[in-house]
Image: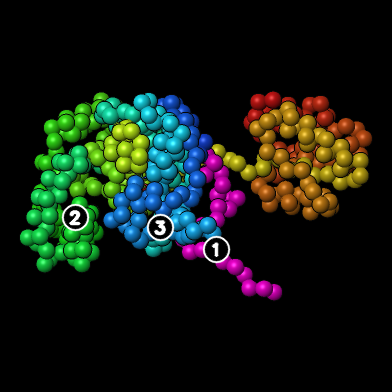
């Protein structure tokens, strides 16, 4: 036997037993997003490396250390997308979706980051991403947060902590950066090595250091909220009032700075204490300079992304309801006549009951073997058709889960009977 080939570390398979919750999340999310007028946009998994460098920022962990970058056979420098926003903005500019208009879009799919894999942190993971363009006011910031809140509610997950902050404009941020750098320099000797390095390149990132000694220093650092320009401050005040109006609880965290460079003004993060260290389930913010930075006309933007693996872990931990998705009915057939009749009958049942999930036995086998397969696939009912039943145009309906005695049903009555037993409308 040849040696087995293993999957890549940090990249997971989705097995059939887990597919139901993914489908459920995708369909509920699509419903919630469209309830706010957002439409789907899909962008490629691979883009030019330059796009992410420019959008996410050269001095970010994502670009410096985490991108899957390669040269293709034509010598182009490409990267697997580490997030969706950059590609969406690129596509929006390229297709003229952003110029002088308002645009509400969502997207989802795989993203790739070369991080150290651990529970809740993967190298290939999935994001659900929502973005709005051409809207500069706090009203759409409130809408963004309301969308996420509605999604939690529709999925039946709870216990989140919503943190918000404002990073101001590039000018006000530069002022803050100077004040913060002065402060951190005065404590430089006590900072951890990583923070010392960041002090020169990206001092705001020192604010979310996890190192306890650095955190102590950061606790007394100047607050970004004391350095906001008047408009950013008014924007932030309106955002808070709007969240209050909707009854969405939040905490202001002046140390929330986010790991991507494109943000301006509002940033936010939904975290949970139920997932250990990888506690951010959803995060985002405003990026009013990004469209112009990527070559479009100046257009405000705001959005967020949900880590699907983390949200699904939470759905599991909280036992939130997920609709059944496995087969409901297994159709056993034996004998030449019955095999052919069953194939036609199975198609008729699928015609009559579009929600029905029915497996038609394939590969022959004795009734006992077929019933074992029926049980193994999780079906609630077996349909049994031998040549005798076929001759009488009947089928036996047998519960596999102790829901009453077997009954013999005429073919014409079968759709109605099954609809009732599995809870579908015929
Ligand atoms: P982000 O905070 O880098 O933001 O990622 C968003 C979410 O993706 C995180 O909150 C987390 O749930 C999930 N996530 C991140 N890294 C991993 C990983 N290695 N494994 C599993 N899940 C992970 C963005 O990507 C921005 N593009 C969000 C945004 C959209 N901002 C504006 N529009």
- Front residue of 22/201: it is 201
Where's the C terminus, which quadrant?
Answer: top right
The mark nearer the N terminus, 2 or 3, is 3
Residue 6: give x, y in percent of width and height. Answer: 56, 66
Residue where numbered disc 3 is placed? 67
The reply to whether callout 1 and callout 3 are in contact (CB within 8 Å) is: no
The mark nearer the N terminus, 1 or 3, is 1
- Front residue of 300/339: it is 300
The reply to whether callout 2 and callout 1 are in contact (CB within 8 Å) is: no
Numbered badge on residue 203: 2
Residue where numbered disc 1 is placed? 7
State whether label 1 is within 8 Å of ligand 1.
Answer: no
Is residue 13 inside the magenta stretch?
Answer: yes
Residue occupying the point 79% across, 48% down: 362
Q: What element carries label 2?
A: helix
The mark nearer the N terminus, 2 or 1, is 1
In which quadrant of the rendered view does residue 406 lie? top right
Q: Which colour scheme is used?
A: rainbow
């Amino acid at each position: 036997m040849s040696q087995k080939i293993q999957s890549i570390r940090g990249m997971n398979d989705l097995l059939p037993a887990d597919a139901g919750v993914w489908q459920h999340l995708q369909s509920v999310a699509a419903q919630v997003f469209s309830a706010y007028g957002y439409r789907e946009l899909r962008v490629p998994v691979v883009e030019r490396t330059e796009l992410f460098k420019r959008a996410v920022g050269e001095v970010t962990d994502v670009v410096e250390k985490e991108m899957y970058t390669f040269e293709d056979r034509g010598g182009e420098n490409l990267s697997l997308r580490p997030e969706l926003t950059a590609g969406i903005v690129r596509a929006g500019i390229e297709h003229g979706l952003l110029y002088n208009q308002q645009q509400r879009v969502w997207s989802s799919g795989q993203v790739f980051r070369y991080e150290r894999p651990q529970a809740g942190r993967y190298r290939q993971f999935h994001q659900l991403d929502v973005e709005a363009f051409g809207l500069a006011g706090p009203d759409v910031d409130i809408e963004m947060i309301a969308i996420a809140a509605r999604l939690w509610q529709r999925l039946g997950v709870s216990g989140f902590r919503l943190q918000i902050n404002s990073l101001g404009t590039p000018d006000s941020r530069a002022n803050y950066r100077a004040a913060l750098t002065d402060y951190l320099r005065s404590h430089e000797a006590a900072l951890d090595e990583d923070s010392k390095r960041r002090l020169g390149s990206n001092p705001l990132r020192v604010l979310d250091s996890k190192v306890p000694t650095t955190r102590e220093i950061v606790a007394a650092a100047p607050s970004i909220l004391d350095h906001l320009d008047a408009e950013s401050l008014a924007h932030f005040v309106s955002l808070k009032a709007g969240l209050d109006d909707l009854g969405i609880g939040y905490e202001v965290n002046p140390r929330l700075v986010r790991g991507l460079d494109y943000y301006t003004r509002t940033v936010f993060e939904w975290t949970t204490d139920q997932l250990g260290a990888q506690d951010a389930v959803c995060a985002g913010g405003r990026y009013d300079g990004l469209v112009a930075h990527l070559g479009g006309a100046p257009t405000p933007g705001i959005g967020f992304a949900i880590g699907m693996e983390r949200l699904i872990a939470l759905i599991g931990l909280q036992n939130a309801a997920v609709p059944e998705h496995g087969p409901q009915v297994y159709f056993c057939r034996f004998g030449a006549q019955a095999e052919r009749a069953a194939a036609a009958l199975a198609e008729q049942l699928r015609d009559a009951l579009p929600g029905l999930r029915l497996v038609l036995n394939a590969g022959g086998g004795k009734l006992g073997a077929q019933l074992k397969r029926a049980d193994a696939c999780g079906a609630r009912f077996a349909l049994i058709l031998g040549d005798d039943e076929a001759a009488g145009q009947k089928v036996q309906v047998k519960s596999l889960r102790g829901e009453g005695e077997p009954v013999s049903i005429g073919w014409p009555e079968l759709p109605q009977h099954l609809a009732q037993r599995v809870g579908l409308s015929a």
